[in-house]
Image: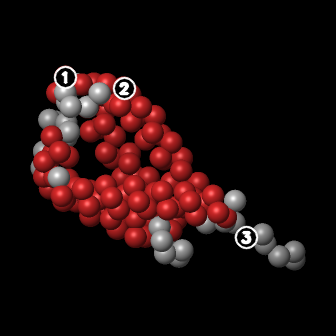
Amino acid sequence: MFILKNLGLAFVFLWFMGGGIMHFVDADFFVAIMPPYLGYHLEIVYISGVLEILGAIGILIPSMRQWAGNGLLLLVVCVTPANIHMWLNPELFVDVSETFLNIRLVVQVLLLLLIWWCTRTPQRESAPA
């Protein structure tokens, strides 16, 4: 189980570190997928990029892992409106297949489960009284 959790952590780390960096490398892409009812698109893209990078680093530090995991869980929930916006408006994203948009929402749920599973601190058994 230890190896599987470490593989899960590695996947989560790469996902968020890579994604966080991309928020700065290709900010225009992330701005374009923001729902129009939200303001401050570029600012939100940069803030979420920083949070993704910090969360990725945080899960590597055992004493911070669960807190960082909680933050990443919250972040994934917070970016869900952008993913739903893309799914509901595929005509706005002609370079992205509808199949990908459908699968993306399922992957997002699986990502939430993986983050939860691999960032939980194991419960220690209490010593008998």
Q: Is residue 21 above or below residue 78?
A: below
- Asked which quadrant contains residue 54, the reply is bottom left
Residue 90's place in the image compared with 67, above or below, is above
Give the secondary structure at mark 3: loop
Is the residue 55 above or below the residue 39 in the image?
A: below
| Nearest to N terminus: mark 3 or mark 2 | 2
Name the residue type under label 1: Glu
Q: Residue at x 14, y 35 (%)?
A: 36
Residue underneath mark 3: 124
Please, which colouring scheme is shown? secondary structure
Q: On the image, numbered disc 2 is attached to which residue?
A: 99
Pointer 1 residue: 91
Which residue sits at x=43%, y=41%? 108
**Viewed as shown, does residue 47 lie left or right of 59?**
left
For the residues bearing labels 1 and 2, Cβ distance under 8 angstroms: no
User: How many tags in the picture?
Assistant: 3
